[in-house]
Each structure stands twice: as C-alpha cells, then as structure tokens.
Image (cartoon, rainbow, N blue to C red):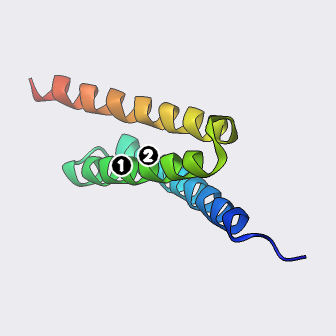
C-alpha cells in the first residue's frame, strides 16, 4: 500500500530530527571532552541545525509526536550551556 505524500514527509522530518539529535549529542560530547573554540562553535552550529530539524518534525507531527526529541534537545542544550559557562569562568 502506498503512503500519502504527507506521511512520507512526516517520516522524513522525524528521521532528520533523529539524525540531527544524534549528531548534536556527539558534537556536544566532543566539545565537553576537548573544549576548544572550534569544537564549541561546531556544537553551537549543530544545535541550531537540530533545533530547526525538531521544529520541522513538530510541524509535521504536532507537539506530542516530538516530546522525546525535545527532551533530548534540552538536555544537550543544557550541557552546551554549562560548557560555555565553564569556559567563561576559566578565561577570568
């Protein structure tokens, strides 16, 4: 049975969000273990991309369809913010 185009689009958005979350987690972990300007910038860029991917998935599925993705995004966002705060303290 062929899926409607809207269903395929929703599945694609979910897949992109899942992939983006995995890459964000890896990028933030890299920045935490090797805190340099480059790894921090990469993590921040990955965060922006992931936020966009999760928003697109939410637009396709509604808020209940992406609750876990939003929780994972918030967790990595918090880890990155802690790293940035720690970096500012060490610059003093």
Question: What is the x, y in percent for residue 78?
Answer: 42, 29
Horizontal relation, residue 59 to residue 89: left or right: right
Mark 2: secondary structure: helix
Residue 48's mark?
Answer: 1
In depth, the one of 68 and 92 nearer the eye is 68
In depth, the one of 63 and 49 nearer the eye is 63
In depth, the one of 35 and 78 nearer the eye is 78
Mark 1: secondary structure: helix
Q: Quadrant of residue 82?
A: top left
Looking at the image, which residue sits at the far bottom?
2
Q: Residue at x 42, y 35 (%)?
A: 77
Residue 64's mark?
Answer: none
Q: Quadrant of residue 62?
A: top right
**Looking at the image, do the residues carrying marks 1 and 2 touch, with CB atoms under 8 Å apart?**
yes
- From what the image shows, is residue 74 above or below residue 10? above
Horizontal relation, residue 67 to residue 70: left or right: right
Label 1: few (<14), some (14–19) or many (≥20) C-alpha neighbours in 10 Å: few
- The Cα atoms of the two marked residues, 1 and 2, are separated by 5 Å
Whether residue 15 is visible, yes or no, is yes
Q: Residue at x 67, y 64 (%)?
A: 6
Rendered-image quadrant of the C terminus:
top left
Residue 51's mark?
Answer: 2
Whether residue 30 is visible, yes or no, is no
Question: What is the x, y in percent for residue 18?
Answer: 61, 54
Label 2: few (<14), some (14–19) or many (≥20) C-alpha neighbours in 10 Å: many
Rendered-image quadrant of the N terminus:
bottom right
- Number of numbered discs overlaid on the protein picture: 2
Horizontal relation, residue 83 to residue 14: left or right: left
- From what the image shows, is residue 87 above or below residue 61? above
Q: Residue at x 49, y 53 (%)?
A: 53
């Amino acid at each position: 049975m062929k899926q409607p185009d809207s269903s395929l689009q929703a599945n694609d958005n979910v897949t992109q969000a899942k992939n983006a979350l995995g890459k964000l987690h890896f990028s933030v972990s890299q920045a935490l273990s090797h805190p340099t300007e480059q790894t921090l910038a990469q993590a921040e860029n990955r965060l922006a991309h992931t936020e966009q991917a999760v928003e697109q998935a939410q637009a396709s599925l509604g808020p209940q369809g992406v609750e876990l993705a939003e929780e994972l995004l918030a967790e990595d966002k918090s880890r990155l913010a802690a790293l940035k705060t720690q970096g500012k303290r060490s610059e003093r």
